[in-house]
Every structure is written in structure tokens, then in C-alpha cells.
Image (cartoon, rainbow, N blue to C red):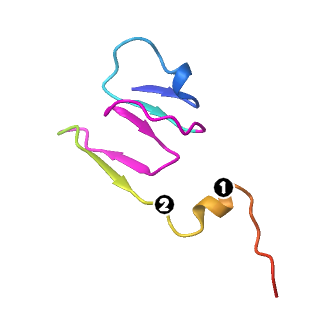
Amino acid sequence: MGLSHKIQNLPKNKCDFYLYGHDKSKGTENHLNGIYSINIIDIETRDVFHLKYPFGTDNYRLLRTKIGI
């Protein structure tokens, strides 16, 4: 596994999967961006499943707060 915060800092050597976030770039099929979804990898079959983040997660990550009464 290649890990980095940004896609341009991922390792150059061959990896089965590259995991990154903090960057809205999209790579190839084995590049999994943690910003868009929770990525679950089945280590036996190497299938990847994408789960949506729970409601409100983006607001929490961006430190948005409710405004109103």
C-alpha cells in the first residue's frame, strides 16, 4: 500500500493500492481517495467497496456550524 496525504506525494514504486486524501485529484482505479468515500478493501479478493460518509461529515470536516435559531 502506498499512503500519502496528497496524490503527488504517493510512492513511485509499484503498489497494489494507493491511499490518499486532502486532495480532490482522481487517479487510476487503484488510487483510492479518502475525501470522496470510505474505501474498504477485501484483502482476499482485492475488491474495493465505497461507502458514503454519514450525513453531516463534510460539515464537520470543514468546521462548518449551524447558523440560525
Which numbered tag is attached to residue 53?
Answer: 2
Relative to 20, is 63 on the left or the right? right
Relative to 60, is 24 on the left or the right? left
Which numbered tag is attached to residue 5?
Answer: none
Instruction: Looking at the picture, tell me which residue is in the foreground, 38 or 36.
Output: 36
Q: Which residues are magenta?
A: 22-44
What's the CA distance linking mark 2 and mark 1? Answer: 11 Å
Please tell me whether residue 12 belongs to the stretch shown in magenta: no
Q: Amino acid at mark 2?
A: Tyr
Local crowd size for mark 2, using a 10 Å CA cut-off: few (<14), some (14–19), many (≥20): few
Which numbered tag is attached to residue 61?
Answer: 1
Dominant secondary structure, magenta: loop
Q: Position of residue 29 (x, y in %)?
A: 31, 34
Q: Position of residue 36 (x, y in %)?
A: 48, 49
Instruction: Looking at the picture, tell me which residue is in the foreground, 16 or 69.
Output: 69
- Residue 5, quarter of picture: top right
Q: Residue furthest left?
A: 45
Going from N to C along the chain, the mark reached first, 2 or 1, is 2
Please name the residue shown 66% across and 63% down the image.
59
Local crowd size for mark 1, using a 10 Å CA cut-off: few (<14), some (14–19), many (≥20): few
**Helix, strand or loop at mark 2:** loop
Quadrant that contains the N terminus: top left
Relative to 20, is 59 on the left or the right? right
Please name the residue shown 54% across and 38% down the image.
21
Q: Amino acid at mark 1?
A: Arg
Quadrant that contains the C terminus: bottom right
